[in-house]
Amino acid sequence: MIKISKFGGSSVADSKQFEKVRAIVQSDPDRRYIVVSAPGRLGSESSKITDLLYLLDAHRQYHVDASVLTKMIADRYSEIRSALQIAYPVEEELQEFFSCYTKMNQAEIVSRGEYYCAKLMASYLGYDFVDAKDVIRFNHDKTVDFEKTAEALNTQLIQHPRFVFPGFYGADENGRIILFPRGGGDISGAVLARCLNADVYENWTDVSGFLTADPRIVEDPKPITHITYPELRELSYMGAGVLNEETIFPVRDSNIPIHILNTNRPQDPGTIIQERIDEKGPPVTGIAGKRGFTSIFIYKHNMSGEIGYIRKVLSVFEKYGISIEHIPTGIDSFNLVVNDKDVEEDLYAILSEIRQQFEPDEIRAESGLAMVSTVGRSMSNTPGVSGKLFSALGANDVNIKMIAQNSDEINITICVEDRDFKKTIRIIYDTFIRENEK
Ligand code: ASP
């Protein structure tokens, strides 16, 4: 089985985390290809090594003495090396880097965070080190050249059957270091997974994957073990984020599952994300919500007979650069749901413009609304889900202001008053998820 195992900054923050990584790697012989970030924050006090390196670069640009900073960086790596008695002489290598960083550019400087971390980890695990600059090849427009990258990776694999690889950077055809955007260690792992056509891309972090609901609202919510990308998109859009979806496009495109796992609790099942899951799951995969919406209700007598009316009204919002979240429609009326903050300044101007130009019979706005999405890929072939949802909310006196269901039927979004926000999520959770646990 081909696995790419990527460990994020919190998983390699100090010697204790390194020990956890080694135990995880050694517990599975398929963990042969390891990608690491630079050491992340250690509690609330310390900084990410990458942030310190950006600062170091700023010192370089302004010709300011950076000895305090270089000591902070060196101490972090030194703690790992000395506590674990790692053979790789990181302190010496860092001294050499600090003696010449003023001649380097920003990308070279910042990339050293993952570089030294990967070297230390390779030495600790007894794996080879493979440098990202010799493998990940960027085009001129800073996109990845997957063909050249796959070629380079396969060449490296012949000599290095088990390796540790620094995330976050690669190089262009002239060997100049190029960085991915911040948090881009995830992209490096995804690129390797795609180039090796991996069976799974393991993403080790500090949470055990996705939860079925926000733990600040629902007590001890169940984890989500399997989720599809479309479901993930719906839930993340409503604020349930663990992973930056954009960073994993290389594996999504090639249908490689991602397994989100927790370095601090490796026994947890984590969450597997896939494009499609064939077996039927529970009707509800997860619930997420957001507050702070305004709904604009527009009624126009005989609107159904007037072609282009909604488009004309929407053009006013476009002119003000406002994105529309939902448009539930009736026969002669519709609602436009937007973010409160987007219309904070212009709401009255927008309403009067619509009034003057398109003469609706009624137009009114209501702010302080919340949206709650109930998401599940199996919902579309389970009759009665919406009936159960609405009866549970009705029985608990939650007034539903609006309902929207998208066409692939994996999401029912409802709009409620802000004061009912948490209550709504708890009721849906109890009805569909807690109920299933019994
Ligand atoms: N070290 C880089 C950052 O902090 C990349 C990563 O951690 O994924 O953004």
Image (cartoon, helix red, strand yellow):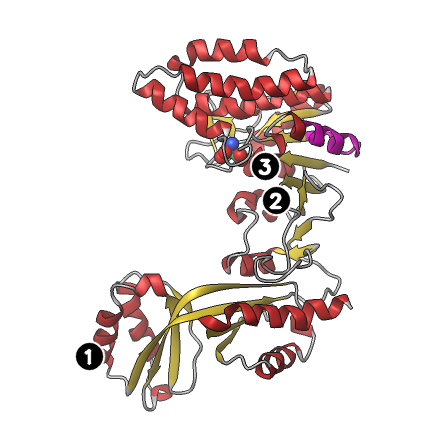
Question: Quadrant location of residue 91?
Answer: top right
Q: Amino acid at mark 1?
A: Gln
**Drawn side of residue 267 relative to residue 318, left or right:** right
Q: Give percent across and percent down for residue 16.
A: 67, 28
Q: Residue furthest bottom?
A: 302
Which numbered marker is on residue 24?
none
Question: Quadrant location of residue 367?
Answer: bottom left
Q: Secondary structure at mark 3?
A: helix
Q: Earlier in the sequence, mark 3 or mark 1?
A: 3
Q: What residue would you read off at disc 2?
A: 251
Q: Residue furthest left?
A: 356
For the residue pair 403 and 274, the one nearer the viewer reads as 403
Residue 403 in magenta? no
**Drawn side of residue 177 relative to residue 410, left or right:** left
Residue 25 in magenta? yes
Q: Give percent across and percent down for residue 62.
A: 29, 20
Q: Amino acid at mark 2?
A: Val
Q: Amino acid at mark 3?
A: Val
Separation (CA) of disc 1 from disc 2: 50 Å
Q: Dot 1: within a 10 Å radius of its alpha carbon, few (fewer than 14), some, or many (20 or more) residues?
A: few
Q: What residue would you read off at disc 3?
A: 191
Pointer 3 with pointer 1, Cβ within 8 A: no
Q: Which residues are magenta?
A: 18-33
For the residue pair 10 and 327, the one nearer the viewer reads as 10
Q: Mark 2 near ligand 1 (CB under 8 Å)?
A: no
